[in-house]
Amino acid sequence: MTIKNNLDATLKSHNAGRIPSLDGLRAVAILMVILGHGSYSLPKFLSPALAFAGNGQLGVNVFFALSGYLIFQLSVRERETTGEFDWKQFYVRRVLRIFPCFYFYLAVIGVLISFGALTLTGPMIGSAATFSLNYRCLWDHWVGDSNYSVIGHYWTLALEEQFYLMWPLLMVLSVRRKLVPALVAAILLAPLLRVISYFLAPGLRGQIGMMFHTGFDSIAVGVLLGELLRRTRPKACLERLARNPWIVGTTIVFLVFLSPLLTARFKGMYSLAIGKTLELSCLGILITAAVSQPGTFLFRFLNWRPVAYIGVLSYSLYVWNNLFLNGEGHWMVNTFPLNFVCVAGTAAASHYLIEKPFLKLKSRFHRSSKPGISPVSTRGLPSNAPAIPTLTQAEVGSATGGRR
């Protein structure tokens, strides 16, 4: 099979159950992360452009927002179709989506440690393996002469899994039509929590953006967007904003150029207090434009086959990129252009050999009435929100990659 045929076949199978525009957003997000991590090896004359194109933190926030949006849509559709939300099957699906690639990568890291190719401590590996890396500084401050950066990106997966623990509560709030005020209050509270943590816990400053209690709003914004797009009046308002090319263009300029410049100039005074919240608000408009405005240049770009294909591979690209795009590494695979080639090749192999076989198992854990499953029933509770757009289980890629 030729490369083109393989790409076409992969996209055909994914497009049957995905929103292609969101795969395109995932592609943009993972390219920002990869360029940020690999900038050390790229020609120096690219540095000014990489300051914006390699904004990995923005890329991660895009992943988080998409994750909250898609998984919420899928969960509500299950509830409205069956009258119940099966939280046990929800967590089984998350395990099948996240764990295989996640732990295979850690197993490879373990092998490299055993051969002396990497140096990492037990607490470092343990924190990564237990989805607690974003709080590691509470019990393990040592970094020293180690290769911590090869697992350092796992904080995003830790934060996301911690957010998933709240999912049954979010579904109950959605059924009782209290989700919007609860999320708005929480999102507005998040900047205050970041500022308080900065002043009261100086030892945690390096992880303020990583910890759940200071970073949950990145995912919460996606959940809020999913709920608002189910309601007639908020949906009409958001789509009206998304139809205006000047608003969408200004949103992109703010996210890519202006906000990074403000962060560089004012640092935490801007980013912790209002910067992140402003960026997340802009992402809500951008995601709405991506899913609701066919025919625009943005829509066509995000649905361009090569871009969408990168989005399909984004979870594997995210998991594996730090092993090769690592300025602390002294191997040939850490030098340009071999480092980028290795990331692409390893991610493709991981997607087809590890991710896809387990993703096929997810179909066994869709809404069902299998014996032994105890769903959280929503029958008898008010549920008069408008129906959401038709989604399928395959539409949810992983928040840090094509996940969810």
Image (cartoon, rainbow, N blue to C red):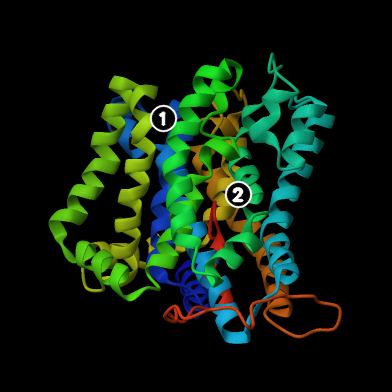
Pointer 2 or 1: first along the chain: 2
Q: Is residue 375 above or below residue 302?
A: below
Image position of 317 (left or right of 283): right
Locate residue 90: give its quadrant.
Answer: bottom right
Q: Which residue is mark 2?
A: 160
What residue is at 48 percent from the left and 78 percent from the top? Answer: 12
Can I make out residue 259 in this image?
A: yes
Q: Amino acid at mark 1?
A: Leu
- Local packing at callout 1 (Cα closer than 10 Å; few below 14, some 14-19, many 20+) is many
Quarter of the picture containing the N terminus is bottom right
SS of the residue at dot 1? helix
Q: Which residue is mark 1?
A: 272
Can I make out residue 311 in this image?
A: no
SS of the residue at dot 2? helix
Q: Amino acid at mark 2?
A: Glu
Quarter of the picture containing the C terminus is bottom right
Where residue 52 sits in the image (x, y, percent)?
31, 35
